[in-house]
Amino acid sequence: MALPLANPQTRRQDTCERSSAFTWRPPRTLLLWHLASLDAPSVAVTWALAFAWVAGVHLDAWIPLLLACGTWTVYVGDRLLDAHRAITSEELDGLHERHYFHWRHRRLLVPLACVTAAVAAALVMRRMPVAARDRNAVLATAALIYFSGVHSPARLPHWLRRMASKELLVGLLFTAGCAAPTLSRLPSSDWPLFACLAIFAALAWVNCFAIETWESPGRPTCVSLRTTILGIACLTAAAAFAFTDARASALVGCAGASALLLSLLDRRRNRISPLTLRALADLVLMTPLVLLIFGARRG
């Protein structure tokens, strides 16, 4: 069975919404950023550097490169496997525009993913200390367990499905991957940093929850409520941190801004095409870039 070149439902929705005066037409680069799975590596690198900035830890250039290559490889593989599974089962309802894009360009993406996987492996073997490899092996194993079954709940162990939703698992694993470089270089415990990690895990969770809700027609939505509560909680925490740790306060404030932007997207979701909405959901997580640019200029 051949996979259609485009999602018919998404195409019809996009056509209808383009005729509406309320629909914003985003730059093509934003859509390509999402479709080519460049959004997840961008968010991962941004927050990894932000965590290091809060802790005052220096990360060598190879570390963001390793994180970007590893994240992109995993996401490309995951989306291609989703598309392949849909073909073999002849169930295309769960596919979205990003899956169709990956399947159309698989002859390019598969070799590129092999290259990025090789680069990541070479960086691990040549640059990463042995002790760090052992610690990160646990994280890599957890990630493999997730990506091998979290998109198909029937494939996950029963005890795991009872303990946590797939959105929560994604948030925890994504946070762990972003935090690992900084945590392995901390000379001592840093409670403001751990507070930032907990807040980002919550932000990643509500981000995944929002996307899952938006892409599941008929599912009751309480995205705006959750994101608004998280945003207010973050801004309150940022105000409290302002008296003890200015950098942690700034990063928590960025998380609050991201949560409130997600809430705004949810309120305007009927005026935005599904593809644009999905791309913007990850774009609003890039708020720490302001801190990184400002910090670099001051440094």
Image (cartoon, rainbow, N blue to C red):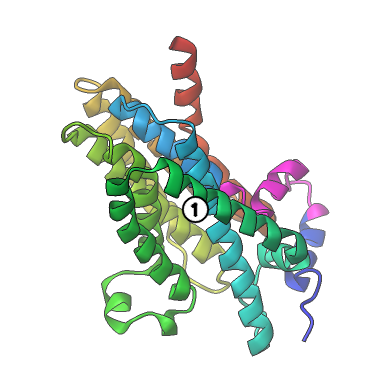
Q: Is residue 26 magenta?
A: yes
Q: Which residues are magenta?
A: 18-40
> What residue lies at 27% left-to-right and 26% top-to-bottom?
239
Residue 108, compared with residue 85, is above or below; it is above
Q: Residue furthest front?
A: 126
Given residues 243 and 38, the one toward you in this image is 38
Horizontal and vertical percent for residue 160? 30, 75
Work out which quarter of the rendered image holds the N terminus and state it.
Answer: bottom right
Helix, strand or loop at mark 1: helix
Residue 143, compared with residue 55, is above or below; it is below
> What residue lies at 33% left-to-right and 45% top-to-bottom?
180
Horizontal and vertical percent for residue 99? 67, 67
Horizontal and vertical percent for residue 8? 78, 72
Q: Is residue 32 magenta?
A: yes
Residue 134 showing in the rendered view: yes
Work out which quarter of the rendered image holds the C terminus and state it.
Answer: top left
Categorize mark 1 by other alpha carbons within 10 Å: few (<14), some (14-19), many (20+): some
Residue 285 showing in the rendered view: no
> What residue lies at 69% left-to-right and 83% top-to-bottom?
87
Which corner quadrant of the image does residue 108 belong to? Answer: bottom right
293 horizontally vs 25: left or right: left
268 horizontally vs 32: left or right: left
45 horizontally vs 10: left or right: left
Task: Give the number of callouts.
Answer: 1
Circle 1: residue type? Ala
Which corner quadrant of the image does residue 193 belong to? Answer: top left
Q: Residue furthest top?
A: 298
Residue 223, compared with residue 122, is above or below; it is below
The residue beneath circle 1 is: 121
